[in-house]
Image (spheres, rainbow, N blue to C red):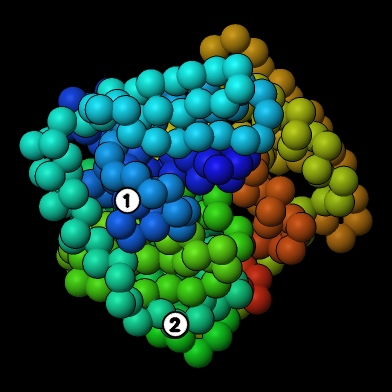
Amino acid sequence: MKRSELLKAVEYVMAGVDKSGSPTGMDFIVFDGKNGWVRSFNDVLSVSYPLATGINGAIKAHDLVKVLSKMDGESLRLDLDGEKVLIKNAKTTLKMVKMEESQLSQFQSRLVSLQTEGLEWQPLPETFVEGLETCLFSASNAPELGALAGVAISGNKMVSTDNKKITVFTIGGKTKFNFILPTDVVNEVKKFSNLKEIAVTEAWVHFKDDTGLVISGRRILGEYPIDKITKLIDDSFPKSKKAKTYLLPDGMSKPIERAEICAGVEGDFGGLATISLERKDKFLFIRGVKESSDLEEKISLTEGCDFPDGVSIRISPTFLKKIIGVTREFQTSQNNSIVLFKSKNFVHLIVVKIG
């Protein structure tokens, strides 16, 4: 076996390895020689990579990836040596203790719930992963929020909110879905940029790329208040009243990047680092503040550009850079308490500080 092939498989499945030191075996990877998979599983996320290893057993994931990445050469022998997995080349011999059979059987019974064999795959819309990444900026990861601790996909819409921000993304393509993915799962799925197909079961959502890799996320069961969210946007920006439109100045990218260095993480802002935008006289001030530093930059509000008085917008600098790459326009609600960014694919709403 080639070392690079095994290392690639292990690095991919690390996304589904428990990093908390759980004693339940979820910090292991499984060699499923019978079905030709290398798998990980942490009860919320699983990654299955197609690789014929010819062995069955589970070993500690973190030690394996560290050693493989530092071994020399390409040719490897992968085998069983009693109750250990043997990985050997001309210079290095690694023996790793397998998970006990009783524990492995229990672990494999949980893997059965994935049902990765015989799934009904559908084409994944091209903008699906982009939508997940966009919605992350408004997604909560607080379990106490229930269904809101994720991104909801309903029809051709993706929706997320943490009660401070709302993002609605329109998915291209004709495929329709109805499920909620936990925010932690979305964070991992978005890292796989070459996903081509999707399959949805009662408990799981599966994604597959063109190599055969499958990443599976456990669904959040519950109702997402999509109708209420849509109504809030419609009520805040009624079509019968034309909202005031503002235009951010050009040349903001570099100041945003500098402010981002000093951006502090706000507990009430989904754990995201944020910067603030505020008008003073004829200038827009961009500010990043954290315990160790405070950076403020001013940009002239040149002709045609405008920003509301008495409003402070707090936003993720990463997302702001994404937004201004699409549009520099935004609107405010009648009392300036809500700011709305809108493009062809997404609507992003922020409850802002006034005065």
Kindly tell me whether residue 23 is visible in this rendering.
Answer: yes
Which secondary structure, mark 2?
Answer: strand
Q: Give me the C-alpha separation between circle 2 and circle 1.
A: 25 Å
The spot of residue 263 in percent (x, y) is 61, 27
Relative horizontal placement of residue 43, taking residue 278 as reference (left or right): left
Image vertical order of residue 230 relative to residue 334, above or below? below
Classify mark 2: residues with Cα within 10 Å, few (<14), some (14-19) or many (20+): some
Residue closest to the eye, 258 or 30: 30
Amino acid type at circle 2 is Gln
Q: Which residue is mark 1?
A: 32
Classify mark 1: residues with Cα within 10 Å, few (<14), some (14-19) or many (20+): many
Quadrant location of the N terminus?
top right
Which residue ends up furthest to the right in the rendered image?
303
* Quadrant assignment, res 326: bottom right
The spot of residue 286 in percent (x, y) is 71, 34
Q: Which residue is mark 2?
A: 122
Which residue ends up furthest to the top in the rendered image?
292
Q: Residue at x 66, y 17 (%)?
A: 294
Image vertical order of residue 329 relative to residue 66, above or below? below
Residue closest to the eye, 10 or 227: 10
* Quadrant assignment, res 34: bottom left
The answer to whether marks 2 and 1 mark residues whose Cβ atoms lie closer than 8 Å is no
Kindly tell me whether residue 165 is visible in this rendering.
Answer: no
Relative horizontal placement of residue 115, taking residue 299 as reference (left or right): left
Q: Residue at x 19, y 59 (%)?
A: 112
Amino acid type at circle 1 is Asp
N-terminal of the pair, mark 2 or mark 1, is 1
Q: Residue at x 38, y 21 (%)?
A: 95
Image vertical order of residue 36 relative to residue 59, above or below? below
